[in-house]
Image (tube, helix red, strand yellow):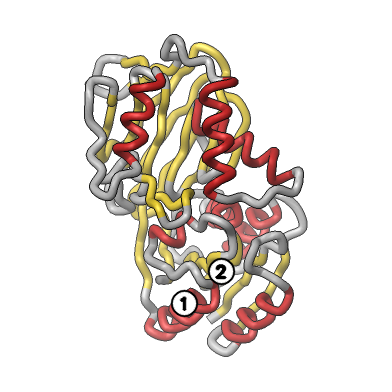
Amino acid sequence: MRALLVVNPKATATTERMRDVLAHALASETKLDVVQTQARGHATSLARQAVVDGLDVVVALGGDGTVNEVVNGLLSDGPAPGQPSLAVVPGGNANVFARALGLPGNPVEATSQLLDALRADRRRTVGLGQADDRWFTFCAGLGLDAEVVRRVERKRADGRKASPGLFVRQGVQQFFLHGRRREPAITVHADGLEPTRIGLALVCNSDPWTYLGPRPVRPCPTASFEDGLDLFGLRSLGTLTTLRHLRQILSAHPRPRGKAVYALHDVTGFRLTADRPMALQVDGDDLGDRSEVVFRSVPGALDVVV
């Protein structure tokens, strides 16, 4: 079996020693190449070349950003028979995709589970989402949450560590100090439904999310890798309305409901338009401002070693 280990050197758990330990363990089971990423987009190029070279597995050692880049490289020409499988060793701060797959948060434990899966040839086929031509594994968002992601990325660029507290602080500041919340500025266009205006749009491909450490974030509690896309929207971003629904999606048994909630479940696709350019994020990665985004569900897009 031929494998590639893609390492993000900035990932929290990936010291040089940890990388070497993981590489040694994987090399005992595979013919392994190890490459450390040098810049944004490098992991995508490496994964794209792995497809050309006919490798069996690409292992992403890093956070959700590294995983997203690898996925976009593997699927640069779309899903195809015989393309490499994806394996993930969590090395970031949130590791949402890895945890959604049921992987341990500890990279050593995750590596042990990965080796067992490789020996048993144990794989799982998952559906993914697309925002225009960009693949995402667990979520995307237009507007408020993407603005929060952008603020967090700026803080990280200044040397701050991504943490639940940082997300909360940046979310509060964006909502109260910088948000334009008076009128819903996003319109949902879905087949068979009347266009609907909303102020917040979260697109879900799995449940739950783990941006806040041990506390799950569940805006779409029925979302699944085996189904189509879910959408959680709010028609109003008033303070009391938003806080009420925030409490719902953070509860142990979430069931977002109320007149302000707009939800879609297991849909093949829809389009979001905005009255003004708004921030777009996929898997916690800021993609810049957009006035229109088409979302699609692609079932059975990728095989994952688990």
Q: Nearer the viewer, residue 188 or 303?
A: 188
Earlier sequence position, callout 2 versus callout 1: 2
Q: Picture coordinates of residue 158 (x, y %)?
A: 76, 43
Residue at numbered disc 2: 59
Q: Picture coordinates of residue 210 (x, y %)?
A: 44, 52
Image label count:
2
Q: Residue furthest bottom?
A: 28
Quarter of the view holding residue 236: top left
Examine the rendered structure and indicate whether residue 40 appears above or below residue 56.
above
Q: CA distance from mark 2 to mark 1?
A: 10 Å
Residue at numbered disc 1: 114
Residue positioned 75% across, 52% down in the render = 39
Q: Mark 1 belongs to which amino acid?
A: Leu
Local secondary structure at mark 2: strand
Examine the rendered structure and indicate whether residue 166 appears above or below residue 200.
below
Residues tagged 2 and 1 counted as in contact (Cβ below 8 A): yes
Residue positioned 51% across, 72% down in the render = 106
Q: Picture coordinates of residue 120 (x, y %)?
A: 37, 83
The residue carrying pointer 2 sits among few (fewer than 14), some (14 to 19) or many (20 or more) residues within 10 Å by Cα, namely many
